[in-house]
Image: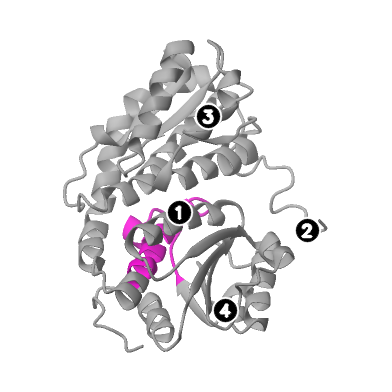
Amino acid sequence: MPLTPIDPRLDPGVSAALAAVAEREVDQVFFVACGGSLSIMHPAKFMLDQHSAALPSDVLNAAEFVARAPKRLTKQSLVVLCSMTGTTKETVAATKFAQSAGALTLVLTTDPASPLAEAGDHAIGFEAPYTTGVPIDAKNSNYARIYQLVLGLAKIFDGSDKLGALMDSLEALQPAIDRAHTHFAPLFADYAPRLAKKDVIYTMASGADYGAAYSFAICVLMEMQWINSHAIHANEFFHGPFEVLDENASFVLFKGLDSTRPLTERAETFLHRFGATENILVLDAAELDLSGIDAGLAGNLVPLIFFDTLWRFAYKIADLRDQEMLEARRYMKKLHDY
């Protein structure tokens, strides 16, 4: 189908990818990655579900994507993959697997010369501060790029035009993050000394925020601080996990602004009913100054604010535990024979 006019402020890599998509018949989108990169696929699917009736989608771990071999994977499929370094072997293999079925592959990575960038049909670059320590503008993050891609797809296949509002909102995102750091600083200073002593810290969220909760659980608490964790969906909490709640249990709850906020509000009420407030860290997006961010997209952008600010909280925990965030890892980036 012909490419409808696209906002000129889009990232060039996204624009090129959308131009290629517009030349194809697409009936299914697969969001595929591992670990922290997989976490951004959940809010991407949430956004696509909200804005596109034409494009059903799935989120899959890269290795399982290959092992599962979905029958719906065909030449009419679009597969979106991500690896920060572009060296995740499972994601590279998933890219090649998708191409073997004739699917179009769009890959996101920070390294344009990486194996993933070379394997994909179209590479989209982004910036990431977490392993480099170099600050970035959030409008250049992985979330920003994949959201541009998703709303571009909605415009091509559904005629839904939210790209202008998104690009305006992305310009306001970094200032909103900076204000959130200031807002959450006293809360983090209060909770860090207690949570740093915990052996288990659960995270909980719903909707667009679930991916950020998942990433904080597995990539920060477990990977970098060896604190047992699990990301619990706010409604799934009431279907088993709430049995672990007592006055000693610790939770980080993400209260976002999307349509699923009532789910986290219900969970918060239960947490405070049977748990101890001093062990329940609640991040409430309704308290933040989100000036310049479109109200209809605020719920989609809040997860990035949560994760960015929690990164600073994690460093507070690391200092109190006397364990370095990245350097102390035993296996990640140190073993290559697994």
Left or right: 215 as drawn, with respect to 206: right
Residue 279, above or below 166: above
CA–CA distance in space, label 3 to label 4 = 38 Å
Of the two numbered discs 2 and 3 on the same chain, state the one appearing first in sequence.
3
Q: Choose between 311 and 94: the one closer to the eye.
A: 94
- Residue 136 position (above or below residue 210): below
Give the amino acid type for the residue marked by disc 4 in the picture. Gly
In the image, residue 139 lies in the stretch drawn in magenta: yes
Per the image, the residue denoted by label 4 is 120
Determine the residue positioned at 20% across, 39% down. 289
**Which residue is drawn at the image coordinates 41% and 54% (left, top)?**
46
Q: Residue at x 44, y 19 (%)?
A: 270
In the drawing, what numbered circle is on residue 51?
none
Q: Are marks 4 and 1 in contact (CB under 8 Å)?
A: no
Q: Earlier in the sequence, mark 2 or mark 1?
A: 1
Q: Is residue 258 visible?
A: yes
Which residue type carries mark 2? His
Secondary structure, mark 1, is: loop
The residue type indicated by label 1 comes to Pro
- Looking at the rendering, the stretch of residues picked out in magenta corresponds to 125-152
Q: Are marks 3 and 4 in contact (CB under 8 Å)?
A: no
Secondary structure of residue under mark 4 = loop
Task: Measure the alpha-carbon separation of dots 1 and 3.
Answer: 32 Å
Read off the residue under disc 3: 237
- The residue that mark 2 highlights is 336
Mark 1 or 3 closer to N-term? 1
